[in-house]
Image: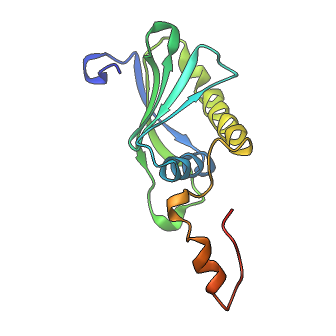
Amino acid sequence: MWDLNKLPAYSKCTDTISTKQYYTIKRALSLGGKPALRYRLEDFPDYDVIITQHQWRCVDTRQGDFPVLVWSGFEQGDIQAIHQPVQVTLECYHYSVDNLAKEILASILKQHERERSEGVLCPLPRKLARPAKQWETSNKVRLRCL
């Protein structure tokens, strides 16, 4: 992966993303059990998005995963303000891509929902589910893990 400290950003600004986008991706990252997620965007065939805890990096796969856009510095604000947009720092490494930032975010969410519906993303990691024997012995509720 390219070292962002050695690359000059074409532009850097503050932006907002919706709480739905932020928390959906944050939840997918925490449930995935991996330090990073990588989405191949069907709406943008040359771009992938690599999501880690501290940044979301849109990369150009034709250029050896060269960063195009980076969302970082997520400021959630007050926990009581969950309905308000999340403040982020948006760094652009290409001169014309800042106009596509909202479309790329929408494409990330669309790809996430597609993978989730196809069963690629498990809603609950298997290691967190209780064994079936414990469910069967419970007198209160009889459920089984699938």
Residue 2 coordinates in the image, percent (x, y): 33, 19
Dividing the image into 4 quarters, which one contains the N terminus?
Answer: top left
Residue 127 coordinates in the image, percent (x, y): 50, 60
Identify whether 101 is placed above or below 127: above
Identify whether 113 is placed above or below 129: above
Most distant residue in the left direction: 6
Most distant residue in the bottom direction: 139
Identify whether 41 is placed above or below 24: above
Residue 18 coordinates in the image, percent (x, y): 60, 46
Identify whether 80 is placed above or below 51: below
Q: How many marks?
A: 0
Residue, x 42% and y 45% (percent of image)? 74
**How was this image coloured?**
rainbow
Q: Does residue 63 appear left or right of residue 1 in this picture? A: right
Most distant residue in the top direction: 63
Nearer to us in this view, 2 or 75: 2
Residue, x 73% and y 41% (percent of image)? 118
Dividing the image into 4 quarters, which one contains the C terminus?
Answer: bottom right
Nearer to us in this view, 52 or 130: 130
The quarter holding residue 99 reads: top right
Residue, x 56% and y 42% (percent of image)? 17
